[in-house]
Image (cartoon, grey):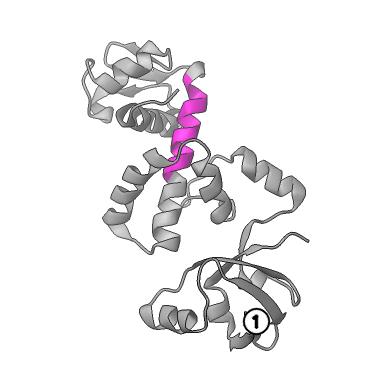
Amino acid sequence: MRLSEKAEEILEALWIATEEKGELSISLDQLNIGSGDEGLLELGHHAFVEVKGERVSLRPKGRADARMSIRRHRLAERLMMDVLDVQGETAEERACEFEHLLHEGVDTKLCTLLNHPTTCPHGKPIPPGVCCVDAQKSGDLGVVSLTELKAGESGEIAYLAADDSKKMQKLMSMGVLPGNQLVLRQAYPSYVFRIGHSEFAVDSGLARDIFVRKASA
């Protein structure tokens, strides 16, 4: 079942209020909606929420969807701020838009790409998904910084997190591009890695900006 964007936003607000702040309900004014709001009526139709007068509460049946809605939102925040380096109000706006696309397993792929983060950029908890539990059990960290690899380990470059254009251009000139295979030859005193038939050396600062999807052992 796919809820509307408005319904998901209401669930997020209810999750924060009830599960994180311990409130039993929130007012329609806090949600900035009226009793006839389409999203609220949709949630009531599915028995996800209960409306009493001007107060709205999250019913047990709606907790799973509310949990997933807040999970998708906070993963989207991580993507915007950590990977795309979009900050401030713009990051929040884009995260709100992008979260509604993270359905049908896309959230799992993003979570793995981000290495199963436990908190959003603001320090709020990201509810773990099945992928997080499986990764913890198997010891598979998914996508990690180059600094987490040991000499001899290899993987596919997932993304770059360089915070300025000069660093990004330097890495790209070495062939450090998403999709390319990388083998770490040395981790001290500098990080020496091979891409294709060429070897390069970078300091720990640049190495931390290279994120790799580790190859299976």
Which residues, given as a range, are shown in magenta?
62-73
Q: Secondary structure at mark 1?
A: strand
Q: Is residue 147 above or below residue 78?
A: below
14 within the magenta span: no
Q: Tell me if mark 1 has few (under 14), some (14-19) or many (20+) residues whose alpha carbon lies within 10 angstroms of its own.
A: many
Name which residue lies at 60% across and 88% down: 201
Would residue 122 be seen by someone viewing this image from the given angle?
Answer: no
Q: Is residue 209 left or right of residue 130?
A: left
Q: Quadrant of the C terminus?
A: bottom right
Instruction: Between residue 16 and residue 49, name the one nearer to us.
Output: 49
Would residue 60 be seen by someone viewing this image from the given angle?
Answer: yes
Q: Is residue 117 left or right of residue 52?
A: right
Q: Is residue 197 above or below residue 36?
A: below
Name which residue lies at 30% across and 15% down: 41
The location of residue 66, given as percent across then percent down, is 45, 29
Q: Is residue 215 left or right of residue 178?
A: right
Instruction: Between residue 150 and residue 15, name the one nearer to us.
Output: 150
